[in-house]
Image (spheres, helix red, strand yellow):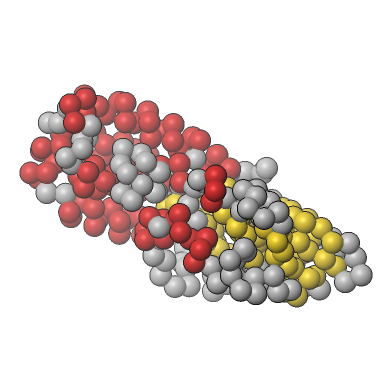
Amino acid sequence: MIRPVFPIILTVALVACALCHAQTASSCPNSKGYNRVHQIAGYSVQISPGVKASATDQCRASVTRSGGSHTIFARGWSLWIDDISGNDINQSGVPDVVFDTYTGNQGCCFEYTILSLGKSPVVVRKIQNQVPVYFRKQTDGSVVIHTGDGAFDLFMLSNTESVFPEVWLRLDGSELKDISDEFTAEYDEKIAKARSELTPAALEKFRSSDFHQQLYGDQHETVRRVLIVVLNYLYSGREDQAWQALDEMWPPADESRVRSLILERRKRGLLAQIGTP
């Protein structure tokens, strides 16, 4: 099983996702020197200003071949060149560049344009998500894509409390593959921690609750811990265990409704982008 080169701490980043664009050292439009030219695989890669205060075109990302044409590949409210650029992200044998876009003024989201720098620059894939996506180089030189499924923002909880089930992906050519089942140890660690924090008294109170009376408003911590268990089983490929945990810990009268909502969120979430574009 492939492991990350260093430990990944995603939870804080996801909670603070609305500020992530501002934390990038060389992001357009506010960082000094963001428009410096980067030389990658014989190409000039640059972030330039677009239309001031435009929600969709305030910043532009371009690639230029020496003596060749200048082409804009990404536009957005805030934009930067991902640190993974220059690596072979999609296992094609040539370097790639990733343009990270944050659409801030529209309230959502993040978009990642992955560009292959072969004989001619070409977009091989775009990834959209409500929370940040991270590209992690592994010890064998391959790149793993790590994020949370942003479709679960505000699911049963506030934004800062929301449980974003983590997802691990790999790009093979233009095909996005879900490799989350290779990281069961990481999921199990989160499951074990959440279970250890669920006291018998808290579970008994929760299972006897009526959603229609208080919307579980007085039990957010219990709701969050139960969702951590269920969603981590589900996203690591252990669906039977996910539904067993839901059956054991969720209020029986509300179980069917919540199961349907979880499946609906997953269907329209990040995993909907799996496969070829």
| In the rendered image, the vertical position of residue 194 relative to residue 89, given as above or below | above
- The picture places residue 157, in percent across and down from the top left corner, at 30, 42
- Relative to residue 240, is residue 55 drawn left or right? right
- Relative to residue 92, is residue 159 drawn left or right? left
| In the rendered image, the vertical position of residue 214 relative to residue 227, given as above or below | above
- The picture places residue 60, in percent across and down from the top left corner, at 71, 58
- The picture places residue 196, in percent across and down from the top left corner, at 18, 55
The extreme right residue here reads 67
Q: Quadrant of residue 116?
A: bottom right
- Relative to residue 172, is residue 201 drawn left or right? left
Q: Quadrant of residue 119?
A: bottom right
| In the rendered image, the vertical position of residue 21 relative to residue 246, given as above or below | below
The residue that appears at 62% across and 48% down in the rendered structure is 55
The residue that appears at 55% across and 72% down in the rendered structure is 25
The residue that appears at 66% across and 44% down in the rendered structure is 276
The extreme left residue here reads 201
Q: Is residue 248 visible?
A: no
**Residue in the foreground of this view, choosing between 6 and 209:** 209
Q: Is residue 102 visible?
A: yes
Q: Quadrant of the C terminus?
A: top right
**Residue in the foreground of this view, choosing between 104 and 204:** 104
**Residue in the foreground of this view, choosing between 16 and 225:** 16
Q: How many marks?
A: 0
- Relative to residue 36, is residue 267 drawn left or right? left
The residue that appears at 46% across and 59% down in the rendered structure is 19
